[in-house]
């Protein structure tokens, strides 16, 4: 499964964010929203997704009516082991 970072810009509070995301709905097979790093002060959000392609992640975000700046394919480097995932 490939990993992606979706970048969002939104001027919202923590409370508004919690209402907006609610309980994540079911996603298509093979697509998973793993976690989000939130910077409420600067209005930036970095969401980690797994899925088959960038297009699949973008399609899910559009279906959720979740505006995004970009979706980037990424690989994780584990500092503890010194390994880069394939």
Image (cartoon, rainbow, N blue to C red):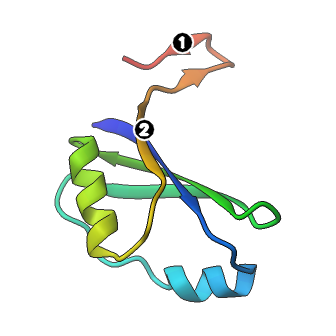
Q: From the viewer's perspective, is 67 left or right of 42?
A: left
- Viewer-proximal residue, 12 or 1? 12
Q: CA distance from mark 2 to mark 1?
A: 20 Å
Q: Is residue 40 above or below residue 16?
A: above
Q: Secondary structure at mark 1?
A: strand
Q: Quadrant of residue 77?
A: top right
- Viewer-proximal residue, 82 or 18? 18
Residue 31, percent across and down? Answer: 27, 55
Which residue is rendered at x = 45% and y = 26% of the image? 75
Residue indicated by mark 2 = 72
The numbered mark at residue 83 is: 1
Which residue is rendered at x = 29% and y = 55% of the image? 58
Q: From the viewer's perspective, is 86 left or right of 5?
A: left
Residue 38, percent across and down? Answer: 69, 61
Q: Is residue 48 above or below residue 38?
A: above
Residue 57, percent across and down? Answer: 30, 53
Q: Earlier in the sequence, mark 2 or mark 1?
A: 2
Residue 10, percent across and down? Answer: 62, 70
Q: From the viewer's perspective, is 8 left or right of 85?
A: right
- Viewer-proximal residue, 32 or 41? 41
Q: Is residue 38 visible?
A: yes
Give the number of callouts. Answer: 2
Which residue is rendered at x = 31% and y = 35% of the image? 2
Q: Quadrant of the C terminus?
A: top left
Q: Secondary structure at mark 2?
A: strand
Q: Quadrant of the N terminus?
A: top left
Q: From the viewer's perspective, is 36 left or right of 38?
A: left
């Amino acid at each position: 499964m490939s990993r992606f970072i979706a970048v969002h810009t939104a001027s919202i509070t923590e409370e508004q964010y919690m209402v907006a995301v609610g309980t994540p709905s079911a996603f298509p097979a093979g697509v998973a929203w793993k976690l989000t790093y939130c910077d409420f002060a600067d209005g930036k959000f970095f969401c980690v997704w797994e899925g088959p392609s960038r297009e699949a992640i973008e399609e899910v975000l559009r279906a959720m009516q979740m505006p995004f700046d970009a979706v980037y394919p990424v690989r994780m480097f584990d500092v503890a082991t010194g390994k880069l995932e394939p």
